[in-house]
Amino acid sequence: MARGRQSRLHEQGGTNCAGKEASGSEIRLEPIQASNKKAVLALELAEDQQDLLADNASSLKEAAGDDDARPRAVVAGDRVVGFLMYDASVNDGEALIYRFMIDCRNQGRGYGRAALSALLKEIGALGHVRDVLVCYMSENERARRLYQSAGFVDERADADGEMIARLRFVRQTRRP
């Protein structure tokens, strides 16, 4: 189910690609468009990660047929370093993060943590989301640590053995 709709978020840790030094650039999320699509399609996972996540070409094809899909390029400075996709339908109070990857040459530099933080801010700004769900392969300890550090709480494994984790947004009420 790692490539299925129910569980599509996996922060990947890699061993197969040589990394570059982090530039200290602020991470931002950009909608996929002509100016960044080629760079998103060129992103790679390490060989030992490829069974954990659908490739970006398949994800973008899926997004083209799904009005609720929100694909984003993860950008550091002027470089695309990752890709993610989520669904935050206004029909319910949940968002589902179902694609999340950082290029193998850019892993271990804090980009995943920064991208997750930017994504949670984007989702929170929508206003209707109460809970954010993410699924990841139970054996992916890097993903577990990343999500737990952001406040996600593991709930249960699904039928395919993938962990489902939830983050509840707490809304502050204003006092008059």
Image: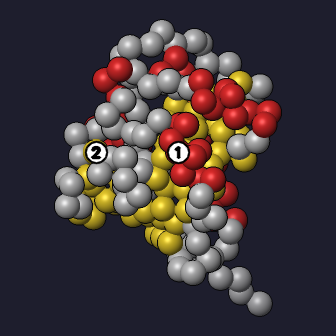
Secondary structure of the residue carrying numbered label 2: strand
Is 55 in front, or is 95? 55
Identity of the amino acid at label 2? Met
Could you tell me if residue 121 is visible in this image?
no
- Name the residue tied to disc 1: 59
Residue 137, numbered label:
2
Whether 35 is drawn above or below 151: the answer is above
Quarter occupied by residue 25: top right
Give how far across and how far down residue 161 sits, in percent: 19, 53
- Residue found at x 52% / y 31%: 102
Is 51 in front, or is 145? 51
Q: Could you tell me if the residues under marks 2 and 1 are in contact, i.e. CB atoms within 8 Å?
A: no
Q: How many marks?
A: 2
- Residue found at x 57% / y 46%: 61
- Residue found at x 28% / y 45%: 137
Give how far across and how far down residue 44 sits, in percent: 50, 24
